[in-house]
Amino acid sequence: MSKLIKNWSYLLVSDVIQQMIGFFVVILLARKLSVDDYGFFNVILSAGMIFSVFAQFGMSNVVTREIAVNPDTTSSFIKKIIIPFRLISFLFSLLIFFGYDFFQGDYGNNTIYIVLIILNLSLWNFSESIAFGHETTKYSSILNILFSLCWLVSVLIIPEKALNVSTILLVYCILHGLKGLSYGIVIYNIFYTKQQYKSKPTRISFFHFIKMILPYFWLVLLGVFSLEMPIQLLNKNGNNIEVAYYVVGYKLMLPISIAVSTAFKAMFPMFTKLYSTNRNEFESKLKIGFKLIFILGTFLAIISSITSKYFIPLLFGSEYINSTIVFNFLIWFSIISILDTLLSNGLSSAFKEKIIALLTTIDILILLPLLYIASFYGAWGIGLAKLISGLLFLGYHLYVFKRALSINILSKSLLNCLFFYLTSMLVCLLINNGYIQISILIIIITIFTSIKNSPIIDICRLFKEFKIKIN
């Protein structure tokens, strides 16, 4: 447990620092570039993210899991399986990208930047999955902080006359290329060349590896589609200004999701071991995770959505006022998204990748048509579509989770958490008058604090127990 807390702490601290730096960079770019240029910059980044999925090919979780179980085969696994497959998948991603760009793309002279983004993300993912398999997160943390600072400094010192989309993309690609290369060197020196990781050959064949990663590839592909397609659809059916409105709302709530997702990354090896050795503890930790996300997430969403109409124009300028409603929808959606990620981690720890892939396929088949229609209404339409679909998906995901693992997540206490979330969300999104909002929310919080087996009181007790253990 101490190693888990240490790893999570490394990642949490680095992500907090990275997101703080990234937050300032987002503000700087949004203010320095025109709204249209800032939107187009994000269209290019989004395209790189989508096509990088074909280069990574869903290997991350499988590599982490296999190295965590068999660390002494690391060197053999890298040499015989990971590197050859990485090269093939990278070439495959380029083939897919250039094929799309030839028939549908409108990226102009920026295709080289998309190729570099694909390469950089692939190299980083390769190194991070190996390090995480050895339950080592400090290298990711150090490199993320260091190169985030370099990114901030670069944006600050670029002369106003040279500040355009092409210059920003060039600097971005150079920095991320150096970051990925640095991580690769660290992996080579620490986990590839040392004798303790060379003692046994891997028993995994190339064909078996492909079979294991295919469900993850499909899962990651659909997941990235759901995250990045709104930007591409707004670019096609709207304009870059709507993209900018959506991106500002999305970027503001992203640090919350990343911090929690980082915790899940650190916990994944532990969940895998717990499922095999102690099912009761596995179930208990999942329920605690659900309760924490519901209660803390709801309080954070309340504060954020009430104050967004003040801090968004203050930070980004009055031209981004239309991002407020987008952010309000997305901050409430982020709680659902985090809960879904916890369910996926639980299923993955139980080696239920096929179920995850099936659920994600159903989700995306429902979501993409909704996003397509919503994109004609602009950024706020996308935000509303994601919130509604997220609530729908969580409901049937919980049912499938219960059937697959025989674990009933929604106890009476967790149902109270759900009702607290829903009532608070409706008040924040449907009532515009701030005084009425706050009055009703105080009543809701008082009621849910006073009821028997109050989830709010349970969370307070949990933090108190944690504080006692630390002391």
Image (cartoon, rainbow, N blue to C red):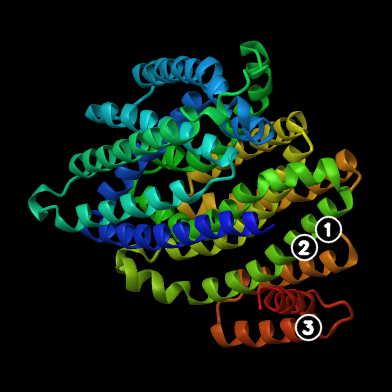
Q: Position of residue 210 (x, y in %)?
A: 63, 17
- Answer yes or no: do the residues labelled 2 and 1 have beta carbons within 8 Å? yes
Q: Position of residue 438 (x, y in %)?
A: 61, 85
**Three-letter amino acid code of the residue under disc 2:** Ile
User: What distance separates the C-alpha of mark 3 from that of mark 2?
Assistant: 18 Å
**Three-letter amino acid code of the residue under disc 3:** Thr
Where 331 falls versus 391 (above or below)?
below
Residue in the foreground of this view, choosing between 250 and 148? 148
Mark 1, Cα crowd under 10 Å, few <14 / some 14-19 / many 20+, is few
Q: Can residue 316 be seen by looking at this rendering?
A: yes
- Picture quarter with the N terminus: bottom right
User: What distance separates the C-alpha of mark 1 from that of mark 3?
Assistant: 22 Å
Residue carrying label 2 = 288
Residue carrying label 1 = 284
Residue carrying label 3 = 449
Quadrant of the image occupied by residue 358: top right
Where 226 falls versus 323 (above or below)?
above
Answer left or right for 5 relative to 349: left
Residue in the foreground of this view, choosing between 67 and 290? 67
At mark 1, the secondary structure is helix
Residue in the foreground of this view, choosing between 388 and 125? 125
Going from the N terminus, do you reach mark 3 or mark 2 first?
2
Rendered residue at 54%/46% (across/down)? 136
User: What distance separates the C-alpha of mark 2 from that of mark 1?
Assistant: 6 Å
Label annotation for residue 37: none
Rendered residue at 86%/82% (across/down)? 451
Residue in the foreground of this view, choosing between 382 and 282? 282
Where 179 falls versus 394 (above or below)?
above
At mark 2, the secondary structure is helix
At mark 3, the secondary structure is helix
